[in-house]
């Protein structure tokens, strides 16, 4: 035979002063619901109003008050706890007050366990609406709970790491700026905060919340090549060296080479023979062109579309022989890759200075961009330090996922809360929340 205590265990009620009296199933708002009834009573040690100690019946029982508390679902059914809370009367101050339980906050009708569960679910890729329905609460409640949990992860403006990573991402619709700003610790890769706008005014307003002394401690800042916050950095972080991220240098030349390939490819008619074959060769093997030259296999014969049995090196050589423009652009690209891989800044400079007259126009533009940043000294630093924005790029994927499942956030703040939670709540912490369910 089941005892009330077993039901208490099932519901995971840890408050020893709650005793359960009844368990029913009722249809509430069209949904079959577990309705659990119970009472909460104890002898208070002191009065919360005046602080007087409860000696010789200073505090007496004074009726009850019923409250309806939302509990976690049990066996798939929404569960409600109708709790009869003891009221007390203090003779010393003539005030009345209610019994308090560790399961639910004062004046709140949602149990702490439901809140914790909402917190742990909002870390996952789930929409607010879904989480609300899962816990039979309103979406507004979910929003409130999420912001309560996220507050822990707001920056305290008391310290900054040695190295900062700056990046931007496409933001939600409600924000004026097209791009939002994100920054993280260069060593731990932990996101510190996100801002709705990446423009100088907003950055200044945010970072000036950190005392000057704290900002002076930042030694390195990794930025994206086309970032416009270069000037804001000088003002805000007087001692910081700027690093153009290696990842972005590779990305730039990589994209440019690919565009050059497409341009060459389009010179061939894809519907007539034999130019169709060349078109297809250029179309199919773009990956091999982007690959590092030293990693192309030279001896391994395999079947390749449009080529038959051959080696990767042979394919690349054939493609490059099609166009002088493609060849020189490719050599420039490989020069940059090699310099970065071997960490030889002199090689990098030599590659930039090499005139390469037949290099494609778009690659010439990229080269000028690189020359501009080299002059500023932002690229040499990339050869000396191992910091990279790569981890933040991974974060940006997460941002996209969250935005998609939420069907776009109305307010930036709730987006920020949700993002901070899912990025910063440690897996360890997550599991501890799960286990307290
Ligand atoms: Zn009192």
Image (cartoon, grey):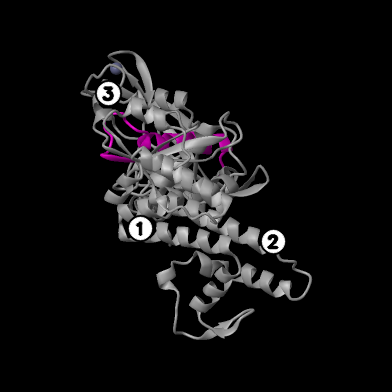
Which residue is situated farthest in the top direction here? Answer: 93
| Disc 3 target residue | 212
Quarter of the N terminus within the rendering: bottom left
Picture residue at 36% right of the left edge, 56% below the top: 340
N-terminal of the two: label 1 or label 2? 2
| Disc 2 target residue | 266
Q: What's the mark number on residue 88? A: none
Marks 1 & 3, CB-CB < 8 Å contact: no
Is residue 299 or residue 47 the one in the foreground?
Answer: 299
Give the label, 3 or 2, closer to the camera.
2
Q: Quadrant of residue 100?
A: top left
Q: Position of residue 394 (x, y in %)?
A: 45, 52
| Disc 1 target residue | 339
Q: CA distance from mark 3 to mark 2?
A: 55 Å
Specify start and end residues of the magenta stretch as a single range: 136-164
Q: CA distance from mark 1 to mark 2?
A: 31 Å
Q: CA distance from mark 1 to mark 3?
A: 37 Å
- Give the left or right position of residue 149, taking residue 415 as reference: left
């Amino acid at each position: 035979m089941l005892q009330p205590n077993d039901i208490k265990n099932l519901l995971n009620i840890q408050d020893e002063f709650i005793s359960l009296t009844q368990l029913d199933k009722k249809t509430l708002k069209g949904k079959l619901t577990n309705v659990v009834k119970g009472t909460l009573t104890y002898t208070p040690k002191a009065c919360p109003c005046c602080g007087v100690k409860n000696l010789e019946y200073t505090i007496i029982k004074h009726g009850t008050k019923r409250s309806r508390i939302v509990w976690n679902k049990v066996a798939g059914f929404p569960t409600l706890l109708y709790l009869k809370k003891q009221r007390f009367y203090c003779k010393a101050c003539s005030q009345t007050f209610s019994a308090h339980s560790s399961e639910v906050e004062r004046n709140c009708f949602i149990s702490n366990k439901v809140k914790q569960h909402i917190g742990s679910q909002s870390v996952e890729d789930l929409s607010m609406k879904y989480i609300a329905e899962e816990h039979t609460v309103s979406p507004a409640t979910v929003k409130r709970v999420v912001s309560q949990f996220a507050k822990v992860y707001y920056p305290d403006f008391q310290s900054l790491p040695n190295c900062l990573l700056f990046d931007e991402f496409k933001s939600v619709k409600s924000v004026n700026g097209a791009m939002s700003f994100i920054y993280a610790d260069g060593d731990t890769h932990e996101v510190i905060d996100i801002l709705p706008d990446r423009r100088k005014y907003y950055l200044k307003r945010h970072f000036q919340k950190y005392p000057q002394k704290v900002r002076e401690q930042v030694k390195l800042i990794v930025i994206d090549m086309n970032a416009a916050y270069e000037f804001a950095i000088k003002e805000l972080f007087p001692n910081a060296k700027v690093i153009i991220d290696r990842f972005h240098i590779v990305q730039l030349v990589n994209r440019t080479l690919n565009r050059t390939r497409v341009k060459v490819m389009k010179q061939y008619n894809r519907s007539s023979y034999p130019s169709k074959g060349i078109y297809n060769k250029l179309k199919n093997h773009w990956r091999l062109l982007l690959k590092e030259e030293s990693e192309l296999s030279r001896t391994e014969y395999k079947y390749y579309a449009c080529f038959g049995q051959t080696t990767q090196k042979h394919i690349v050589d054939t493609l490059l022989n099609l166009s002088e423009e493609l060849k020189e652009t490719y050599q420039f690209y490989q020069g940059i890759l090699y310099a970065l891989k071997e960490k030889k800044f002199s090689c990098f400079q030599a590659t930039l200075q090499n005139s390469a007259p037949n290099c494609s126009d778009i690659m010439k533009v990229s080269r000028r961009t690189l020359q501009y940043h080299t002059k500023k000294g932002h690229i040499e630093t990339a050869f000396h330090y191992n910091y990279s924005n790569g981890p933040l790029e991974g974060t940006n994927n997460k941002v996209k996922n969250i935005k998609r499942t939420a069907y776009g956030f109305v307010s930036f703040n709730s987006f920020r809360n949700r993002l901070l939670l899912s990025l910063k709540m440690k897996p360890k912490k997550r599991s501890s929340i799960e286990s307290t369910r």
